Amino acid sequence: MKFKVPYEDGGFPILNYAYEIRSNDGTDLIGEGVILESKRMLQASDNSDEKSFVFDRDMLKNIVGGKTYKFSIAAVNELGTG
């Protein structure tokens, strides 16, 4: 998964990222968790404001083939998630 890092961090460094996986209509929560900034994050080589992340099998255990899902990710720092 590739995503753009936030333009503004509120003056506090990003500690990690929270993620949610929902059904395509957004009603069912399929999975959620925290991605630590120091682990699993890769800076995209072609664009410094993008990062990428690879979900492991355990994080995707509730995903069913043939269905569509929505993934969301939010930065977390001392001020909270946003």
Image (cartoon, grey):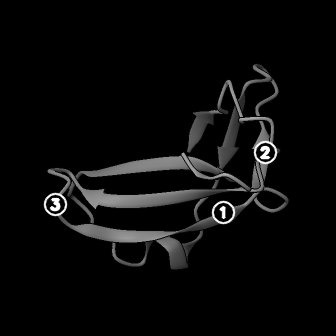
- Label 1 to label 3, Cα distance in Å? 23 Å
Which circle's residue, 3 or 2, is located before the other in the chain? 3
Whether residues under marks 3 and 2 lie with C-beta atoms below 8 angstroms apart, the answer is no
Q: Is residue 9 above or below residue 48?
A: below
Q: Secondary structure at mark 1?
A: strand
Please state the horizontal and vertical placement of residue 15, each as a whole percent of the image: 77, 56
Residue 14, percent across and down? 76, 47
Q: Position of residue 49 (x, y in %)?
A: 73, 24
Quote the CA–CA distance across marks 3 and 2.
Answer: 30 Å
Q: Give the quarter of the image for residue 17.
A: bottom right
Residue topped by disc 1:
35
Mark 2 or 1 closer to N-term? 1
- Residue carrying label 2: 42
Label 1 crowd bin: few (<14), some (14–19), many (20+), radius 10 Å: many
On the rendered image, what quadrant is the C terminus found in?
A: top right
Q: Residue at x 51, y 73 (%)?
A: 59
Would residue 36 appear left or right of 62 to someone viewing this image?
right
Residue labelled with disc 3: 27
Q: Secondary structure at mark 2?
A: strand
Amino acid tagged 2: Leu
Q: Secondary structure at mark 3?
A: loop
Find residue 66 and name its label. none
Which of 60/29 is in front? 29
